[in-house]
Image (cartoon, grey):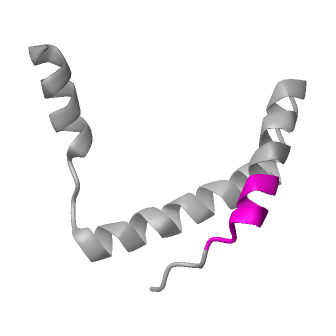
Amino acid sequence: MTTEAIDLTEAKRELAEAIERNRKGIRDPEVIRRMRERMDRRREAIFKKFGLLNIAVELVREARDE
């Protein structure tokens, strides 16, 4: 599996659109489905490349110690 290249201009446009939809209270099931699929593909690619990353666990432990 290869990761798709991220076009920053396109990503910024999509983010602005998502923020506007959220601000208006609009939930488009098709957009949500596509976002979930994209996140799943990227998560799988990261897992295949680096394995399991437990960085959040370490951050929580550090925060407790402060």
Hey, which quadrant is residue 28 in on the image? top right
Q: Looking at the image, which residue sits at the far bottom?
A: 1
Is residue 59 toward the left or the right of residue 20 in the image?
left
Which range is magenta? Answer: 6-13
Hey, which quadrant is residue 66 in on the image? top left
Q: What is the total number of numbered labels drawn onto the structure image?
A: 0
Viewer-proximal residue, 36 or 56?
A: 56
> Main SS type for the magenta part?
helix
Q: Position of residue 43 (x, y in %)?
A: 43, 62
Please, is residue 17 above or below residue 8 in the view? above
Hey, which quadrant is residue 4 in on the image? bottom right
Please, is residue 26 above or below residue 43 in the view? above
Is residue 47 toward the left or the right of residue 21 in the image?
left
Viewer-proximal residue, 36 or 13?
A: 13
Residue displayed at 50% across by 62% down: 40
Is residue 22 toward the left or the right of residue 57 in the image?
right
Please, is residue 31 above or below residue 61 in the view? below
Residue displayed at 26% across by 38% down: 56
Is residue 46 toward the left or the right of residue 40 in the image?
left
Asked if residue 36 is among those painted magenta in the image, a careful observer would answer: no
Q: Position of residue 22 (x, y in %)?
A: 80, 31
Quadrant of the snapshot with the N terminus: bottom left
Q: Position of residue 19 (x, y in %)?
A: 78, 36
Residue displayed at 36% across by 68% down: 46
Asked if residue 12 is among those painted magenta in the image, a careful observer would answer: yes
Q: Position of residue 34 (x, y in %)?
A: 71, 60
Residue displayed at 86% across by 36% down: 21
